[in-house]
Image (spheres, helix red, strand yellow):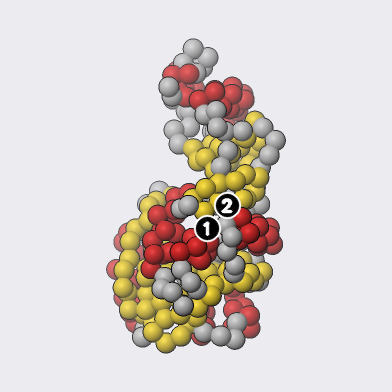
Amino acid sequence: MSLHSLLQTKLPPEKLALLPKSFEVIGDIAIISIPTALEDEKYIIAEAFSSLRKDVKTILRKLHKIEGSARVADFELLLGERTTTMHRENGCLFELDVTKTFYSGKMHYERDRIAHKVKDDENVLVLFAGVGTFLIPIKKRKTVNITGLDNNRDACQFLRKNLELNHVEANIVHGDARHINNLFKISFDRIVMPAPYGQDSFLDIVRSILRPGGCVHFYTFKKDFEIPHFKRLLEEKGWNIEFSRDCGNVAPRVKRYVFDLKSR
Ligand SMILES: C[S@@+](CC[C@H](N)C(=O)[O-])C[C@H]1O[C@@H](n2cnc3c(N)ncnc32)[C@H](O)[C@@H]1O
């Protein structure tokens, strides 16, 4: 049964048409976007949703777009109490507070793909590591020396907890990626960087801590028409593009892209 059919007798057709068609479930927390035109019906909608998804214990309404360097949205609690949950992805467990740290399940395929690309004995850096969604699957599959960096203290604390939960070890650095030249005195074989929106300049910064011939998995946000120009720019800056793919829309016409790069 759908939310629409469950509420058919409770809401007029013009309100039914506005019901959210998509939602994200992280562990036992559901995140839904309810338009302001359904303000008076928000609790009825949350109740209906919870009767459809018995596994969901908390329902949060996403209020604003993801903003700020921590990439965390604003939420209104509609049902339940907890905002901390345990989520399983790629065979790993992640504890996180959705109101304090970034998480999106849309990247699960990429996190698994990168874990398979990494080679044993590499020295790997995960910038913008969050709660460990790229780092932990890599460390679970490969014998590597791995470091995760994030400037969100809460994300670093959950990352520490998640290392324990998954029985793996890693170095955690709570710091600003803009200062990596001061933070690291070694070179990395591979750097994974799910860079924040509009911050492509981080790709220039990592050059100084990447060994010659090293790999970078660079995530960026672009419109389709910008890609040919961006690829030319990467080549001009001394990167070989080994692979690239569109990882899906994040806003109308804006997509997340990944570029697997090798330094020349
Ligand atoms: C889009 S999230 C990616 C999180 C994680 N890698 C994932 O895919 O789930 C971006 C992360 O970068 C962190 N961040 C943003 N700006 C940063 C900076 N200047 N230095 C270090 N971390 C930063 C945020 O705290 C956030 O955890």
- Tell me the element at label 2: strand
Q: Which mark is residue 94?
A: 2
Which quadrant of the structure image shows residue 219? bottom left
Q: Is the CB atom of the residue marked by disc 1 within 8 angstroms of ligand 1's nearest atom?
A: yes
| Quadrant holding the N terminus | top left
- Residue type at mark 1: give it: Thr
Residue 138 at x, y percent in the picture: 48, 65
Residue 120 at x, y percent in the picture: 43, 74
Residue 224 at x, y percent in the picture: 32, 59
Q: Residues within 10 Å of mark 1 (few under 14, many from 20)?
A: many
The Cα–Cα distance between marks 2 and 1, rounded to whole angstroms, is 8 Å
Which residue in the rendered view is the most extreme toward the top? 9
- Asked if residue 28 is positioned above or below residue 181 in the image, the reply reads above
Q: Which mark is residue 133?
A: 1
Q: Residue at x 50, y 78 (%)?
A: 123
Q: Choose between 201 and 5: the one closer to the eye.
A: 5
Residue 202: tell me if it is visible: no
- Residue type at mark 2: give it: Phe
